[in-house]
Image (tube, helix red, strand yellow):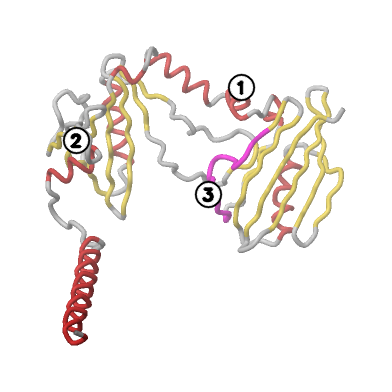
Amino acid sequence: MLRSLAPLTSAKLFFKLATFMTAALAISAVSADTEFTDNIPIDLARALLSGAGTAMEIRIYSDIPDGFPEFMLPDGATVLGSVDQGRNRQVILGSEGDGQQQLAELIDSLQQNDFLLLSPMGATTPRTGFVSATPQNLGIPSQLCHDTQGLLYLRQHTEADRTFINLTSLPGTSRGNFSCAGLAAQASNRGSPAFLNASRGGGSLQNSMPRLVLPDEATTQSPSMPLFLSGSPQQAESRIGFSVAWPLSEAYEFFAGQLTEQDWILDGETIGDRVALGAWTREENTQMLLGTLRLVSGEADGYEAVFEVSVLE
C-alpha cells in the first residue's frame, strides 16, 4: 500500500513543479520589456490613444485631417502625422534645431487667419518676491482663439537636435460663453497685480514686497514662481527653496544687497551656522513696513529663503 502511494506523490510533486515553471514563464513573458522600434499596430495605437475599453472612435492620419484650422507649414518643418480623438484633433510637426523660428512662423500664419493670440496662464513672471535669475521654459503652450474655429494650443518639445511641435485644436464650444476678446481680457487680468493678490491671498502688501532675484548659479524646482505665497491686507510672505554652493553668510549678503538697493533700511541682523535673520523697514504710502528676511541652510547646498512683510502699527 505504501509503495502504491509513492508514484502518486511523485506525480503530484511533478505537476506542482510544472505548474510553477509554467507560471514563471508566463510572468516572464508578461513583464518583458520589448520596445516597438518601427511600426506600431494600428489597433494598438487606437486603443492607447482612446483608453482601452472606450467606445471612442480614433482616426490616425499621415497628413492633416479635413477641417483642421488652416496654417502655413513653416520652412524646415514636416508633417509627421495627426490624430482625431473626437474631443480634439492633434497635428504633429517635426523640424531640425530648436524649432523657435518654426513656432513663430506658425503663430504668425494663424494670426493672419484671424486667430487671436492669448496670454497663457502662469506665463507672467512675478513682479515681487523671490524669482529665478534665469527663468526656464515651463512648457506653457501658446494659446490662440478663433470665434468660429475654437481654441488652438501650440506646444513644442526638443530632443537633441530634433523638435516636435504639437498643434491641438478644440471645438468652438470649448470657449464656453466667452468670445475670443473676452478670453483675451481674462488672460490679461490674470497677469495683473490685482489678480495675483486676489488669487494668492497676498492682499495689497504683495506689491510692497521687494523683488529678490536668486543667484545666477542657483537651481530650483520653481524657476519662475515662489513655492509658497500667503498673506492678508496686513501681511504677505514669499518663500522658495533653492540650491547654491555658497556659504550662508554670502547667500544672506546677496539678498541683503538687493534690499538696500530697493530702499529697505536694516534694523538688525544675526548670522549663525544654519540660520540668518534680518529685520528691515521701509516707509511707503504713509505706512511703515517691516520686512523680515530668513535664510535657512539645509543639506547638499540647499537653502530655504523666506521674506515676510507686514505693517508696523
309 on left or right of 41: right
The residue to which callout 2 is attached is: 83
| One can see residue 92 in this view | no
Q: Position of residue 215 (x, y in %)?
A: 61, 52
Please state which amino acid type lies under the numbered disc 2.
Val
Q: Which residues are magenta?
A: 217-230
Residue 25, quarter of picture? bottom left
Q: Secondary structure at mark 1?
A: helix
Residue 194: assigned label: 1
Judged left or right of residue 218, residue 60 is left
Q: Position of residue 168 (x, y in %)?
A: 28, 31
Magenta-span inclusion, residue 287? no
Give the residue pinned by disc 3: 221
Mark 3 residue type: Gln
Where does the image place residue 282, in percent across and percent down from the top left? 81, 33
Please name the residue shown 64% across and 36% down the image: 229
Q: Main secondary structure of the magenta part?
A: loop
x and y percentages locating residue 170 in the rendered image? 29, 25
Q: Nearer the viewer, residue 5 or 13?
A: 5
Query: Are there few (<14), some (14-19), or many (20+) residues within 10 Å of tag 2?
Result: many
Considering the numbered disc 2 on the image, is that residue within a helix, a strand or a loop?
strand
Report the residue at 31% width, 39% height from top.
101
Residue at 31% of width from left, 14% of height from top?
Answer: 147
Q: Tell me if label 1 and label 3 are in contact, CB under 8 Å.
A: no
* Disc 1 to disc 3, C-alpha distance: 26 Å
Q: CA distance from mark 2 to mark 3?
A: 33 Å
Of tags 2 and 3, the one toward the viewer is 2
Q: Hey, what amino acid is under mark 1?
A: Ala
Q: Along the polypeptide, which appears first: circle 1 or circle 2?
A: 2
